Amino acid sequence: MLEPIDNLVKVLSRLPGLGRRSAQRAAMALVREPARTLDPLSSALADVRRRVRCCSRCGGFTTEDRDPCDLCSNPLRENVLCVVEDASDIVTIESSGAFKGRYHSLGGKLSPVHHVGPEKLRVPELKERIAAESIAEVVLAVSTDMEGDATAGYVEESLRGFPSVESPVKVTRLAFGLPADSGIAYSDPLTLRRAIAARR
């Protein structure tokens, strides 16, 4: 394979969901019709690189001319704060239309394997926002794996008795349950245990 194409395949294969074969097919499609695919992609990538930033308040994606982002600037959003691991989680939850509050990205989750300790999470910024924005409830929307559970526990412990012992912020976590349009036979034992415990 030609070196430039091989380099493109290597870069594409780093993207989530793209293995070597999928990356190779994508690279060939881009090279086959550069005017229709490669040039617009190059332009879009350059535009994202130049203009997209993380919001200084929530840590979500925004553009350089909109900081804080539109979600943080919207006075109609409820004073409930959804805490997520990553900025992309904000996009996912917001697209559901089910949450009308504000967001806060931690910028990761506790992971000794990846050398992510408490000092790398945006918990001090979270506490500042709770106090400054009179947040009534914090909803922990983190993953349900071991690292996500550890992160949720750490954040919950950090917010115990905050901002004051008399009126601490309420901390909740997303309910666990069975995925929509899925049968019980396809669910793992942990998901089933959590679904039964969180039944209503």
Image: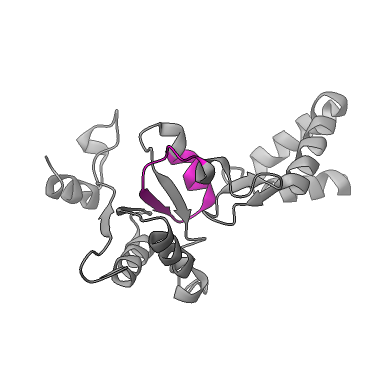
102, 39: nearer the viewer:
102
Q: In this view, does 163 lie to the left or right of 191?
A: right
Q: Is residue 143 magenta?
A: no
Q: Height in image: 115 above or below 141?
A: below
Could you tell me residue 71's position as x and y percent? Answer: 51, 42
72, 191: nearer the viewer:
72
**Which color scheme did the rendering employ for the protein?**
one colour
* Magenta part of the chain: 74-93
Q: In which quarter of the image is residue 47?
A: top right
Could you tell me residue 197's position as x and y percent? Answer: 13, 50
Could you tell me residue 9's position as x and y percent? Answer: 75, 45
Task: Say which quadrant the N terminus sits in.
Answer: top right
Q: In this view, does 60 lie to the left or right of 143?
A: right
What residue is shown at x 28% (from left), y 31% (from top)? 182
Is residue 1 visible in the rendered image? The answer is no
Q: Does the magenta stretch include residue 84?
A: yes
